[in-house]
Image: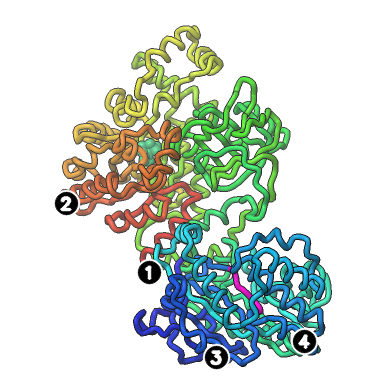
Amino acid sequence: MQKHDQDMGGPTHDETPDSVLITPVAPIANHTHGGRAKCLQRLVRLDLPVPRTVALSFQAVHGIAQGEMPDMASIVEAFPADALLCVRPSSQDPDWGGPGAILNIGMNDARYVDLCDSLGRDGAAALYLRFVQSYAVHVARLDPDVFDDVEDGGPDALSEVLHAYEAETDEPFPQDPAEQLAAVLRSMARAWEGTSARLLRQAKGAPADAGLGLVVQEMVPGFGQGECGSGVLQLVNTKTGQPQITGRYLSQSQGRDALGAGAEALYLERDPRGPSLEDSAPEAFADLKSHARLMRQRLREEMQLEFVIVSGAVHILDGVRVTRSAQAAVRIAVALAEDGIIPREEAIMRVDAHILTELLHQQVAPDATRDVIGRGIAASPGAATGRLVFTAAEAQASAARGEPCILVRRETSPEDVRGMHAAVGVLTERGGITSHAAVIGRGLGLPCIVGASNLKFHSKRKQLIATDGRVFTRGDTITIDGSSGEVLAGQPEMLEAAEDGAFQTLLTWADEVRDIGIRANADTPEDAETARKFNAQGIGLCRTEHMFFDPGRLTVMREMIFAETSEGRAAVLARLLPMQQEDFFALFRIMEGLPVCIRLFDPPLHEFLPTSKSGQRELSEALGIPVSDVTRRVEEMEEYNPMLGLRGVRLGVTVPEIYDMQARAIFEATLDASKEGEPVVPEIMIPLVSAKREVELVKARIDAVALAVKAERGEDFTYRLGVMVETPRAALRAGEISPHTAFLSFGTNDLTQMTYGLSRDDAGRFMSAYVNQGVFPEDPFHVLDTDGVGELLKLGVQRGRAENPDITLSICGEHGGNPESIAFCREAGFDYVSCSPFRVPVARLAAAQLAI
Ligand code: PEP
Ligand code: MG
């Protein structure tokens, strides 16, 4: 999350005084005293009723941790003699945390007696008790269990706690307020420097030497005569971001007691569910509302106020940024910009692009209980609950009964695609982020976990065995969280998808500033519709072999692969031609003149050959040959290294009629679609190229088909021919390839696989071990390896452009939807990125943030 608090002015470290009373002109800055101190100064500048506060600098707190106490007298003297104090942490970024606040410092036996007069014995005991307990646990480091038996509140509880303290420490509870304060400061400073605290904040992005400031504030206890109490208030709903006064208030309380008080606490605004502060203290409520509005306006953020009311008068103790869900983060940023409080660019910068994914899919609710039974690679975001099924047929049957199901497979193949359509989520034992299940899952917007190798899959027994030995059988309910990679037992509470008006507005603003194009990878009319819905600027990759996943069509595709004679092949291709023509026509129509980049067939054979007996039987029926012949052919065609076998252009060169058919289908559909609407200029892409000659051969035949179609139809059209750079050699030889092509599209899935020599289907088995041990910083199939693969991309871009300055450059591997990878592509001079339709919104926002 981009931090909007830009206030970096103020003194340098050396000039920073150890402690300073917060006034409108005191030298306080985020990077010397922390965000809380700075925020309190802003509230003071707004003339809000903030109690006296002294801020200790990072430098001073670091010194305290090392045993160098600051001048305590100057701190104590800033407050009235009998004031009670509290100390709170103030780190540079509030998200980095810090030790918990300690309240009521200065309470001792004498103050207790004094306060019994003004607050009553219960009120005075509550203050003292709270202090002794937090001092004992956080300063004297006693085990909290020591106080387990103490009843809540009251003078009896107080004397019990004081006795327990003395028994555990062999010392009476310290009575000198200055000594108490010094001990609190020391313990908080040391807690910050402890190893676990450091690791925790580093995990949140804090630098190793992040400093801690502390603020010492005069307590305004919410106890006493008249309306006294404490509470918190904010102007928006934390979950939705919609305007709504939320928070609670508790009479005769302090700190955040109101939040844990259940029914006893009052609502703030008048509320049918129970009594409210608006009813009991309307003036204080009105003051609070106007203070909160002023803070929103001037601090340019939705803030939560911590307040105390004393005899009807409001005091503001603190303001913190409202915590927010992904949906609320978007809504709040947009509302602040729409109200003219922040510019649109700042609203764009305030939303972390990654969180948009959460708004597009159902999620496990953040506070839900997670019964984790296994883990895998989070391959397609969103969460889904359903009954376990182990075959595509079971998935379809389940869907027909109206029962949501999770399809569990060792790995998926085209035969499973119908089952994937029928399921609400997919879980596979094998595979990585670019394996079949992952790519299809993302395309469909279907939650998916792959490579869950710590679960045992027994497809025959229809069982899934959890890491802890629990056995789940067909029909049992599980949940997969494709955002975290966790497989959960049962049905946790879910949060619905929430792409609302604010989401659309933010993306519209993003489109106005971004300077790199965003297209979608879309194979079917449904994908294309999704791409349009998310405002993709065209299709950057249509994987034509994916148009044959439908079981009816799969057989035709297999017949084509199996054809042994040219007559046999011609007959199959004649059946494929109208199917393809119809497919392309549908895409062109949906895209209404936006570019559509069609990749010629690239069917990895192992994904398309029928491996199961039933699949082989079906094919034998379709071909009218014995099953034994099918089995023999499958064995003959089996490749040792299928990802590097007869794929892509290699198929096009060895069996050129296949690409001829596709080119014809594209051109016929181009003419048909152009008649109905915007003129279509198709883009045709040659996959898996490694040599210039491959391009020359395919180009010559496609040009010939174009001429033939133009002559037959007596109509003209143009088209653009391009090359996919997916092999290291194609990147290295981009200079000799580019003069023959209108565009180069970098397929970083295969390029990553080949650069690392890492099978994209098998990497899931050891990827987590590699990432955990720091061999790879991240899964390179997920986040582009800018050092190695990136170097090849840069070489390809530079050499390709040098020989063809007008060439269009893009990326269409899965990295196209990853914000970090988009940053690299923009830097490298790409014209557009193309990603799964559901990742388009993330890409649009991430691209805009790069341009600001
Ligand atoms: C690629 O290799 O990056 C690519 C987009 O093609 P596919 O994933 O279909 O191999
Ligand atoms: Mg590829």
Q: Whereabouts is ligand 2, in terms of quadrant?
A: top left
Mark 2 → mark 1, Cα distance in angstroms: 29 Å
Q: Is residue 675 visible?
A: no
Q: Which residue is mark 4?
A: 282
Residue in the foreground of this view, choosing between 257 and 689: 257
Identify the secondary structure beneath mark 3: loop
Earlier in the chain: of badge 1 and badge 3, it is 3
Residue where numbered disc 3 is placed: 78
- Frontmost of labels 1 and 3 is 3
Q: Which mark is residue 852?
A: 1
Figure quadrant of residue 335: bottom right
User: Is 186 situated left or right of 10 in this image?
Assistant: right
The quarter in which the C terminus is drawn is: bottom left
State whether label 4 is within 8 Å of ligand 1. no
Q: How far apart in space, not on screen, are marks 4 and 3 (Cα)?
A: 33 Å
- The kind of residue tagged 3 is Ala
Q: Which residues are magenta?
A: 100-104
